[in-house]
Image (cartoon, rainbow, N blue to C red):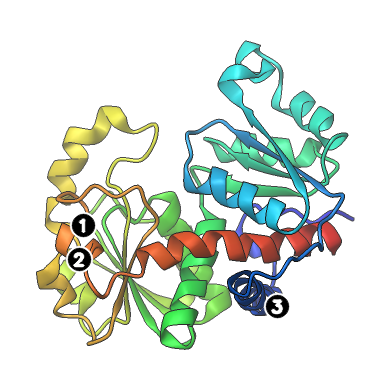
Amino acid sequence: MKQDFLTLADLTEADYRSIFDRAHALKASRKRKEVVTTLTGRHLVAVFEKASTRTHLSFEAAMYQLGGTVSTSVSASSQIARGETIEDTARVISGYADCIMFRTFGDDRLQAFAKASAVPVINGLSEGGHPVQVLADLFTVEERLGGVKGKTVVFLGDCASNMGRSFVEATRFFDFHLRLGCPEGYRPDASLLAAAGGRVHVTADPSEAVQGADVLVTDVWTSMGQEAESARRMKDLHGYQLNEALLAQAKPGAIVLHCLPAHRGEEISAGVIDGPQSAVWDEAENRMHVQKALLERLILG
C-alpha cells in the first residue's frame, strides 16, 4: 500500500527518528564524496503550480544523488493550464513515476491529486502546510543544538501561514515547546492549537515570545497568492520583525531559521539573517538531505 506525505501526521515519531538518522548519514556520505545508489532505476516527477527555488532544486538534487532520475512539470506549460483535471494528471503521472512531489495552492487540490495517484505523493508546499520544510528546520535544530526535544522554538509573524501551521503540528511528534508571536487575525485555527495540547503558547507580545528561546523562526509576511494584501500585512506585522533587539532576549547561542526567500528589512533584519547565529544556509542545504531520507522511506518502504 502506498504511503503519502501530505502532512506531518502521515508518519510517526519513530518514522521521523529513522528519517533523521538516515539524513545525518546521507549528509556525512555526501561530505565524504561517496556515491549512494539506493534509488537507481527509480523516477520522481515534480509538479509545480507555485514558483519555487529550494523545493525545485533540492528535490532534483536529492533524487539524482541517490542514483534516481527526475522530471519536472510546471502547470503553466502543461495541460493543467488548459483545463485537464488534477485527477487525470495524477493518474497519468502515476504511470511514469515511483513518487510524485506536488507543490500547489489549496489543500483540496493536494488531497484530490494524492487520492487519484497510484504512487506516493509528497506535499512540496500547500496553503495548509509545508511539512518538508519544517522537517529540514527541525533537523537543523538537532544538528546545531543536539536535539529538538524540550527546546523552545519561537515563530514570529504570520502564524496562520503554512509554516506556522506545520510548526504547530510538529509539536505533537517532536516534543518541543512552541511560542507563536503574532497579532490577532494571524493565529492558527483553534482546532489546530487544541490538537497540540499545552505545547503551544500564543502571544501578541513579540518580546514575551522570544524570552529565553532556543530557536527563532520567521517567514515572509506576504506569501504567494497574497500579493493584494501586502500593504495591510506590512502594517499589521511591522512590530514582529526578527531583529537584533529580539534576538538579544533569546538564550545565548540561540539559532535563527528562515525558510527563504528573505526580505531583509521586513520580516527579518540583515544583521540577524547574515549574523553568526543564523543557521539559514545550513537549513536550506538540509532540505536536500532530509528529502533524500524521505524519498527512500516512501519509495523503498
The residue wearing badge 1 is 268
Residue nearest the observer in this picture, 74 or 193: 74
As helix, strand or loop, the secondary structure at mark 2 comes to helix
Question: Where is residue 117, by image quadrant?
Answer: top right
Q: CA distance from mark 3 to mark 1?
A: 33 Å
Mark 3 closeness class: few <14, some 14–19, many ≥20 residues within 10 Å:
some
Residue 298 placed where, x, y %? 78, 59
Residue 196 seen in this snapshot? no
Q: Is residue 240 at all visible to an observer of this figure?
A: yes
**Inter-mark Cα distance, 1 to 2:** 7 Å
Q: Earlier in the sequence, mark 3 or mark 1?
A: 3
Q: Amino acid at mark 3?
A: Ser
Q: Is residue 15 left or right of residue 233?
A: right
Pick whichever, 259 or 231, lies toward us.
259
Q: Going 18% across and 50% down the picture, which residue do you hit?
A: 237
Q: Look at label 1 and name its amino acid.
A: Ile
**Residue 74 at x, y = what percent?**
60, 27
Which residue is denoted by mark 2 in the rendering?
272
Residue reaching furthest to the top: 82
**What kind of element bears circle 1?**
loop
Q: Are the residues flagged by discs 1 and 2 in contact, CB closer than 8 Å? A: yes
Quickly name the residue at label 3.
18
Q: In this rendering, is residue 99 above or below 7?
A: above
Residue 135, x across and y down, in percent:
54, 66
- The residue located at (18%, 74%) in the rendering is 247
Marks 2 and 3, the one that precedes in the sequence: 3
Query: Does 228 sit left or right of 189 as displayed?
Result: left
Q: CA distance from mark 2 to mark 3?
A: 32 Å
